[in-house]
Amino acid sequence: MASPEEAYSDETLAFMDLAIQQAKLALDSLEVPVGCVIIKDGKVISSGRNRTTEARNATRHAEMEAIDMLLDKWQERGLSKYEIAEHFSKCILYVTCEPCIMCATALSILGISEVFYGCANEKFGGCGSILSLHLGNSESHNSGGIPQGKGFKCRGGIMASEAISLFRGFYEQGNPNAPKPHRPVVRQETQ
């Protein structure tokens, strides 16, 4: 039986490996290990890793870091909103974990072309696990009141075992940045 990775091109696997490297940098910084790269015309034009703890800002997900890097660069070059939208429409994102609802919404509004991700995000996934924001919507809002863009192509499961392994390593070591519980943990006795 062929492994799931055999279904993807060498280029796809190479770009996902770069995203995994970004996730490892996040892990080294005691952040939740998520990393990404943004590709345009076959080249990496931006990368990001989770920085929520370092920045003390819950919106500093890997995707938002990479997006902001591009926005800053393109705005410095004097590109108009239309030109920036044109650039995003030619970009592909590789990210180690399914984009959360916040990031999937941003990607849809920006008009990114395609997203490849590693493991599913069963708690907060915006590309099928919880919501399917990648499908877009012809109306300005979906039934949940979340702003929508035109949507984007999306494929998951690429190098998922590597992404999951990074998460396991992070949570097994314990998260030193996690808030302390406000009340003691109550253990249920089995009868």
Image (spheres, rainbow, N blue to C red):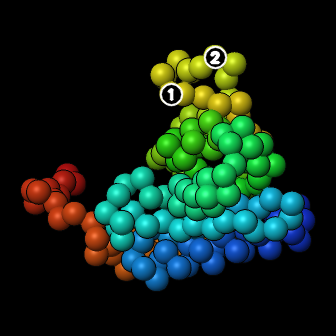
Q: Residue at x 76, y 54 (%)?
A: 92
Q: Residue furthest front?
A: 78
Residue 151 vs residue 124, the one in the foreground: 151
In x, y percent, where is residue 110? 65, 41
In x, y percent, where is residue 49? 53, 68
In x, y percent, where is residue 65? 53, 61
Task: Tell me if 91 is positioned left or right of 63 in this view.
Answer: right
Return the residue at label 2.
139
Return the residue at label 1.
146
Q: Residue at x 77, y 61 (%)?
A: 39
Name the residue type under label 1: Ile
Instruction: Please identify the quarter of the rendering in which residue 139 is found.
Output: top right
Q: Residue furthest bottom?
A: 28
Name the residue type under label 2: Glu
Crowd band around label 1 with a 10 angstrom C-alpha radius: few (<14), some (14–19), many (20+): few
* Residue 85 visible somewhere in the drawing: no
